[in-house]
Image (cartoon, rainbow, N blue to C red):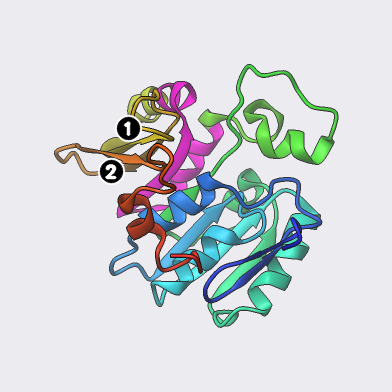
Amino acid sequence: MSEHVFHFKYFTIHQDRCAMKVGTDGVLLGSWVQPVDCKTILDIGTGTGLIALMLAQKTDAQITGIDIDENACIQARENVNESPWSDRIKIEHCALQEFIRETNQKFDLIVSNPPYFVDAYQANDAARNLARQANASLSFDELINGVKNLLNRTGNFCVILPCKEGMMFKDKAMGAGLYYHRLVRIKTKMEKLEKRVIMCFGFENIKMEEEEIIIHQDDKGFTQVYKELTRDYYPAF
């Protein structure tokens, strides 16, 4: 299979013009989020359109994906148009800050696999830098402010980040008035330290729940938990 094409069970992702390719983070977030009773969903930093398409597969919601990268938006639209859900997914080329100024819409669910390397060395590739560096295009404070402006009062915001950046983001979000509802700790293997966290926030102050997902078992491929989580998407499962 070409590295520029990624086949899922019910849709295909072309990614030759996108800085950020299909990866485990996006698949984890799209698989884990359950958009129950959601009528409107916003995907911030949609990239190839992967998460928007994954959510469209399991909901009847109207979905908007936004991205600052024009080439990513062009490719995301192509991926959406080739999917069974092209009538329910809209891709817009704009920054979150611009989107807030131009819309009055509120969303039942907001998802993001955002820029995250806050302190890391910046790569030479400008598009990849925009996609990976939190201070290049969308700071955590700006993302949190955007969510607060766009989320319905009973809605949820779900995000995946590396652990260090995730804890930093959690503190900022809670300081800004978002409550921390669920935390998923992601490990590549049982004996490894957690690598990523998925977090769910909202405006309601409810009891927080935690869980753990381990991706690989030693020398035996993927864990059953990971297979069950991603079964509706990966052809091999």
- State the SS at label 1: loop
Q: Position of residue 104 (x, y in %)?
A: 51, 60
Q: Which residue is mark 1?
A: 177
Q: Residue 109 — which label?
A: none
State yes or no: discs 2 and 1 in contact (Cβ < 8 Å): yes
- State the SS at label 2: loop
Query: Label 2: how many residues lie within 10 Å, few (<14), some (14-19) or many (20+)?
Result: some
Q: Is 102 rendered above or below residue 133?
A: below
| Gap between marks 2 and 1 measured at Cα | 7 Å
Q: Which residue is mark 2?
A: 203
Residue at position x 34%, y 63% in the image: 35
Q: Which residues are magenta?
A: 142-169
61 or 103: nearer the viewer? 61
Residue 16 appears left or right of 66: right
Q: Which residue is the extreme one toward the left? A: 207
> Which quadrant: the C terminus?
bottom left
Q: Position of residue 203 (x, y in %)?
A: 28, 43
Q: Position of residue 179 (x, y in %)?
A: 27, 36
120 or 189: nearer the viewer? 189
